[in-house]
Image (tube, grey):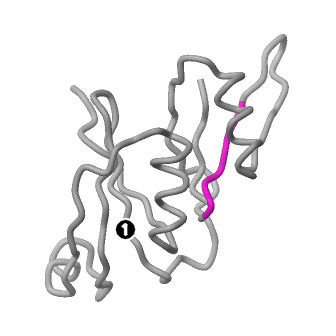
């Protein structure tokens, strides 16, 4: 089994571009629109919004662009990303003002970053 894609939300296309293209280095593969009718059928919501599919050969993330967020982040939801050079990736995040959570765990540490809309990513 292989995960085809993950779906997240972003409050703006600018935030999505900065994080998914700029920091994660994913390509914009497709832009489309979630209609109210389809949203009702699939997700039981009247949300209507554009969405962007970002990806590369290993990863795809569908980002729904909407200003309708839940009251707060769901505390344990996240994606785990494996990067080639963790230190360089975290440095790039710091350069772009992306929050980093570092928790010591024995001789290593668990690292999470957060995009500009509060979606969390564990970094391996």
Quarter of the image with the N terminus in it: top left
Count of labels in the image: 1
Quarter of the image with the C terminus in it: top right
- The residue nearer to you, when weighing 8 against 72, is 8
Query: Residue at position x 21%, y 87% from top?
Result: 36
Query: Residue at position x 34%, y 44% from top?
Result: 27
Q: Which residues are magenta?
A: 111-116
Q: Where does label 1 land, which residue?
A: 64
Badge 1 local density, few (<14 within 10 Å), some, or many (20+)? many
Above or below 67: residue 109: above
Looking at the rendering, which quadrant does residue 60 occupy?
Answer: top left
Above or below 2: residue 65: below
- The residue nearer to you, when weighing 55 against 95, is 95
Residue 115: in magenta span: yes
Q: Main secondary structure of the magenta part?
A: strand
Picture coordinates of residue 67, whole percent (x, y): 49, 82
Residue 21: in magenta span: no
Secondary element under disc 1, as helix, strand or loop, is strand
- The residue nearer to you, when weighing 77 against 81, is 81
Looking at the rendering, which quadrant does residue 7 occupy?
Answer: bottom left
Q: Is residue 108 left or right of residue 70?
A: right
Above or below 44: residue 97: above
Q: Is residue 49 left or right of residue 108?
A: left
Picture coordinates of residue 29, whole percent (x, y): 24, 49
Query: Residue at position x 58%, y 42% from top?
Result: 121
Looking at the rendering, which quadrant does residue 52 occupy?
Answer: bottom left
């Amino acid at each position: 089994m292989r995960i085809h894609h993950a779906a997240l939300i972003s409050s703006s296309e600018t935030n999505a571009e900065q994080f998914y293209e700029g920091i994660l280095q994913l390509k914009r593969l497709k832009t489309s629109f979630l209609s109210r009718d389809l949203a009702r059928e699939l997700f039981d919501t009247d949300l209507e919004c554009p969405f962007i599919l970002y990806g590369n050969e290993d990863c795809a993330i569908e980002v729904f662009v909407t200003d309708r967020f839940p009251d707060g982040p769901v505390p344990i939801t996240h994606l785990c990303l494996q990067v080639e050079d963790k230190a360089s990736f975290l440095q790039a995040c710091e350069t772009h003002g992306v929050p980093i959570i570092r928790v010591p765990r024995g001789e290593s540490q668990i690292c999470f970053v957060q995009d500009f809309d509060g979606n969390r990513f564990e970094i391996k």
